[in-house]
Image (cartoon, helix red, strand yellow):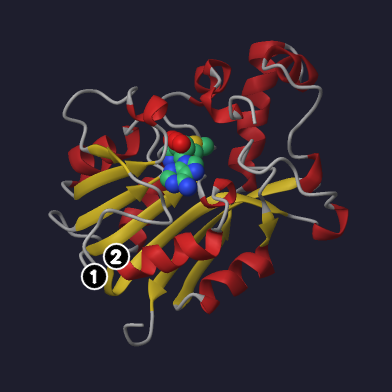
Amino acid sequence: MGRPLYEDPAVAAVTGETLRPGGFMLTDRSVGLCALPPGARVADIGCGNGATVRRLRERFGLAAVGFDASLSMLRKAPPGGLVVQGRAEALPVVSGSMAAVFCECVLSLVPSPAEALRECRRVLAPEGFLILADLYQRFPAEAGMPGEHGASCAAGARSRPDMERCVRDKGFALMRWEDHTRLLKELAARIVFAHGSLDRFWTHVGLNGPPGDCCGRPGYGLMICRKAGPER
Ligand SMILES: C[S@@+](CC[C@H](N)C(=O)[O-])C[C@H]1O[C@@H](n2cnc3c(N)ncnc32)[C@H](O)[C@@H]1O
């Protein structure tokens, strides 16, 4: 696999410091929805350059730490940014120690989402929150062949029922689902304004077309889940 799409500087040029639709909007909203108090320990899985970890610490006073598989992404974090290397499937975190886990635009990139969810559950305290924001297949019947895994969030996007089943199977209660496809449309519009057209953007990043053809027309969703049931 070549460089993943999110590592191309052309993506950060349109998304800003975060690499997802909506920037901090859904992060901030989730902190409020989960009523996370200052000082609560939270983890940002697939934290990229650590911008969200900073936001959670500085704006909300949360004891946030970030984990990312990619050293090249972590090198973009400022020194002392409280981000460390760690894969979603094997987090270097004590069991039951986190009040919440954020995972924004990451699960669709992970080779084994089930493993990552099992690990999120392990590190969460009882009734801890799992906050998932990701692309999803809005019209699963349109979806084509799976894309090259890990190349982009669209390539690994799944349908909403599939995502809901996956979190339930892994021991979470789904508290809330929200559609935020508008944020994805806004990002697409920003790309068009920056490059003239989506096709020109794909050419600019060295692709023949969208890596997410496999997903049909994508949407963007927020899921808030709670760790449920006894320890496994
Ligand atoms: C689209 S970027 C999103 C980064 C950040 N969450 C944000 O929204 O700005 C996806 C991130 O997930 C990381 N990632 C991909 N697979 C991972 C895995 N298995 N474990 C941990 N991080 C992973 C990538 O290195 C990348 O930084």
Q: Does residue 177 lie above or below 30 as drawn?
A: below
User: At x 67% / y 36%, what residue is drawn?
Assistant: 185
Is residue 23 visible to the viewer in this orientation of the structure?
no
Three-letter amino acid code at the position of disc 2: Val
Q: Quadrant of residue 141?
A: bottom right
Q: Position of residue 199 (x, y in %)?
A: 79, 19
Image quarter of the N terminus: top right
Q: Quadrant of residue 97?
A: bottom left
Q: Quadrant of residue 229?
A: bottom left
Find the distance from the CA under tag 2 to the CA under tag 1.
Answer: 5 Å
Q: Does residue 103 lie above or below 77 as drawn?
A: below
User: At x 39% / y 64%, what residue is drawn?
Assistant: 119
Q: Does residue 229 lie above or below 112 as drawn?
A: below
Do labels 2 and 1 touch, CB within 8 Å?
Answer: yes
Q: Is residue 155 left or right of residue 228?
A: right
Three-letter amino acid code at the position of disc 1: Gly
Nearer to me, 128 or 171: 171
Badge 2, how many Cα within 10 Å: few under 14, some, many 20+?
many
Q: Position of residue 182 (x, y in %)?
A: 63, 43
Which residue position holds label 2?
123
Nearer to me, 131 or 167: 167
User: At x 27% / y 53%, what residue is drawn?
Assistant: 92
Which residue position holds label 1?
96
As drawn, the residue found furthest toward the left would be: 39
User: At x 53% / y 65%, what residue is drawn?
Assistant: 114
As drawn, the residue found furthest toward the bottom would be: 230
